[in-house]
Amino acid sequence: MSIPISDCHTHTNPVKGLGMKVIAKKFRDAGGWFLGIVSLPPSHYGLEPTFDGYRKAYDLIVRESESARDIGLEVRSFIGIHPADIDKLLARIGIEKTAMLVDRVLELVEDYIKRGLVNGLGEFGKPHYKTVPEAFSLCEYVTIRALEIARDYQVPVHLHLEQKGIATTRSLTIITKLVGISKDLVIVHHADTRTSISCSQHGYPHTVLGKYELLRSVLSSIPTAEMTLVESDHIDDPRRPGVAMYPWDIAISIDKLREDGFDEEVLHRILVDNVVKLFGAKPP
């Protein structure tokens, strides 16, 4: 019997890419039952990086989430300000105008959460590349504000962080303690094996790319996988097809792991049980 497939962090672009009317159906036909749909920067949708551009991008996520639900999937939707957005805004309009804009957008994010239009925040976080000092400072501020909103409304938040194992989780633990948010709501996105191990040790849910080699490495290192979820991080960009991977290809990786003799109870845990526990999703 096949194991239901979940993808806890994926993107959609109905303007330039496939969009959810195609993605959700192909995913469902491959055994998919749950999607976590995360907003892309406005520029991906041909929108200006303005307050109105963010509002239109968030409205798109609301509509795309409904499209996936109409196809029969369990869906959770997330909106945020990607750290790469802040780099681009700083270069375009400077620090003062960027700071004012992100405050307005954060108020918008909170409003969408309050009105029940989306289910959580994401993605927020820190640059994992060289950038100007003010970008690091502003990203830190924006991330802390996102954690505060997630705390106040008791919703999950996806964090885009550097993948540095214990250095990442120790830093995160200090921040989450200061904010007063439960670790259960803080999802470390796109974790590598080292960071996945540290997240498990420190009690953080985390998404791991559904590539066979990475899942094999993680599950060999963390046999119980109590905090592990699977993602495709598919960006739905026709210029870069299949990046990071197609959601429906997660099923291929899981089939290979089953052939390798990995415990089916553990595979069910990362694809179903942990998703139900974290997101309150109705199990398949």
Image (cartoon, rainbow, N blue to C red):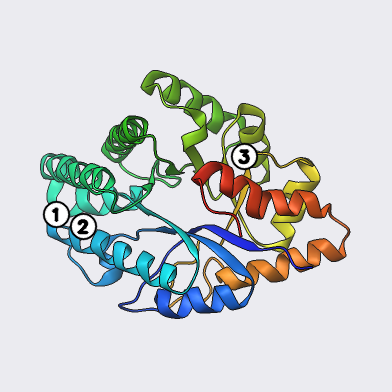
Q: Nearer the viewer, mark 3 or mark 1?
A: 1
User: In the rendered structure, which amino acid carries the disc numbered 1?
Assistant: Phe
Q: Secondary structure at mark 1?
A: helix
Quarter where residue 47 is shown = bottom left
Q: Amino acid at mark 3?
A: Thr
Q: Is residue 232 above or below residue 221?
A: below
Give the residue displayed 20% in from the left and 45% down from the top.
111
Mark in front: 3 vs 2:
2
- Measured as percent of width and height from the top left, residue 109 is found at 25, 46
Asked if disc 2 and disc 1 are in contact, CB closer than 8 Å, the reply is yes
For marks 3 and 1 on the same chain, the one whose residue lies earlier in the sequence: 1
Judged left or right of residue 137, residue 65 is right
For residue 244, what is the image quadrant?
bottom right
Kind of element beneath mark 3: helix
Q: Which residue is mark 2?
A: 54
The answer for how far apart the CA atoms under marks 3 and 1 are is 34 Å
Residue 275, given in percent of the width and then of the height, sits at 58, 49
Is residue 95 shown above or below 70? Answer: above
